Amino acid sequence: MPTYPSFPPKQQYKQKAYFGKYGLWKVVTVFQCDLYFVPPLSLFVGQASQLGVYRAFVDNYEVAVETAEKCCQANTQFAEISENLKVRSTKDLKDQSAKNSLETLLYKPVDRVTRSTLVLHDLLKHTPCSHPDHPLLQDALRISQNFLSSINEETTPRRQSMTVKKGENRQLLKDSFMVELVEGARKLRHVFLFTDLLLCAKLKKQIGGKSQQYDSKWYIPLSDLTFQNADESEPLHIPQVPDEELDAMKVKISHIKSEIQREKRANKGSKVIERLRKKLSEQESLLLLTSPGMALRVHNRNGKGYTFLMSSDYERAEWKETIREQQKKCFKSFSLTSMELQMLTNSCVKLQTVHHIPLTINKEGQEDESPGLHGFLNVIVHSASGLKQSLNLYCTLEVDSFGYFANKAKTRVYRYTTEPKWNEEFEIDLEGSQTLRLLCYEKSYNKTKQIKEDGDSTDRIIGKGQIPVRL
């Protein structure tokens, strides 16, 4: 015999937690049934007119989530059941073991409004202006967008309180695609730095033209984040790919790009070009994963460490500086509920500033994307001035070839001076390059401090800058 929670939730709890659900069920059921008999356009227009039902649910959403949490806290059996709910849907039919939490199910109607608006937008995009359905689709889209705008304006404080404590405002400060080292394997991640936490997410594979979606892998509140674990006494071992293999990949990428341009000039079939683009994307993705070798290591308050691999010390320094500066404003530890984490992860799609993995195929067709320079760049590093104390100094040069920044050259160490004069010339290969970066380091000769917080040398960046590369 199945057992049930010893206390049935009070009627008022039921009304709060499930308010508006029946009305939503009727709207969705009618929509699904009519798919077999009514033209799709009429269905979308009709659904747009039913948004008032969604409004009632959205207005009650915060209360529903809060009530569900209270019930979970009051009864452990209710909490266990609410975390393992089986719901049949077309998506879950293939996986009969699929389970959802109550919070996830409560969020689905909220998410449905946004997804329906995106569907309308896509339909309108592929419907000619001369088609009789075009003005009707415009009306349906306008109604849906106005509805979402009104919800956003009136519920912004409420939505913030779901993910942030009252009186606080979480904002995105920085984001970037990075390579994470997971049990010796390299994984591509999208890392988001918010005002109070660092979030690591995985970009889901896009199927059937669906919009971007992320899976959260982990997060660390900035108040709990450290760059060095006291227990670490050995440098991190990073499996490196030999330079010869990386150079071979770059040669192959350049060769495929030349082939694509040759096929375009010859006006060959699109299938040939598409096949070459696929090969190019595979090679660039492989290079993006295998080339980074500089570690950026972070730890949570329990000492669990996470390692990112980067090709640019300039970018690594910027991430550290931004995190440390923001940590000065973060004092309290906290944890997110599964619902809060899901909502935060969903918001990343709209908040992200880096929208595409740095591959050639993702840059094609972007009006604001410069093709960059190809060939060789001769750079002379002359001298430095303005230093207040004598140091052992050297410089490195970074260039954004093949879609990412990498170290291209390094001067000799100029010993103990305030006015180093290197006067060294370097020839740097360019591959779609747009920016040259210069970093100046103080060389450390302290043999007792050979291990830094990230497993690298203790050389300190004392200055950095960048300039655009133009003809």
Image (cartoon, helix red, strand yellow):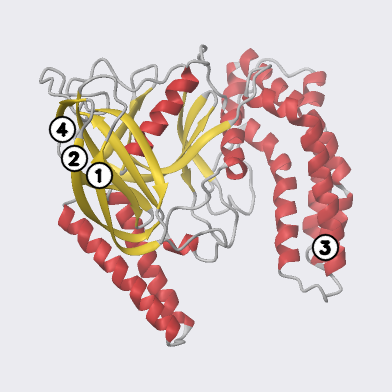
Question: Viewer-nearest of labels 4 and 3?
Answer: 4
Q: Do the residues under discs 1 and 3 have CB atoms within 8 angstroms? A: no
Mark 2 → mark 4, Cα distance in angstroms: 7 Å
- Among numbered discs 1 and 3, the one appearing first in the sequence: 3
Residue 427 occupies which quadrant of the picture?
bottom left
Q: Do the residues under discs 2 and 4 have CB atoms within 8 angstroms? A: yes
Is residue 22 among the parts visible in the rendering? no
Mark 2 element type: strand
Q: Residue at x 37, y 51 (%)?
A: 404
Q: Residue at x 40, y 33 (%)?
A: 318
Mark 2 → mark 1, Cα distance in angstroms: 6 Å
- Among numbered discs 2 and 4, the one appearing first in the sequence: 4
Question: Viewer-nearest of labels 2 and 3?
Answer: 2
Q: Do the residues under discs 2 and 1 have CB atoms within 8 angstroms? A: yes
209 displayed left or right of 379:
right
Mark 4 → mark 1, Cα distance in angstroms: 12 Å
| Disc sitting over residue 422 in the figure | 2
86 displayed left or right of 142:
left
Location of the N terminus by quadrant is top right
The amino acid beneath tag 1 is Val
Task: Write down the residue under mark 4.
Answer: 414
The amino acid beneath tag 2 is Trp
Note whether 399 is above or below 77 in the view shown.
below
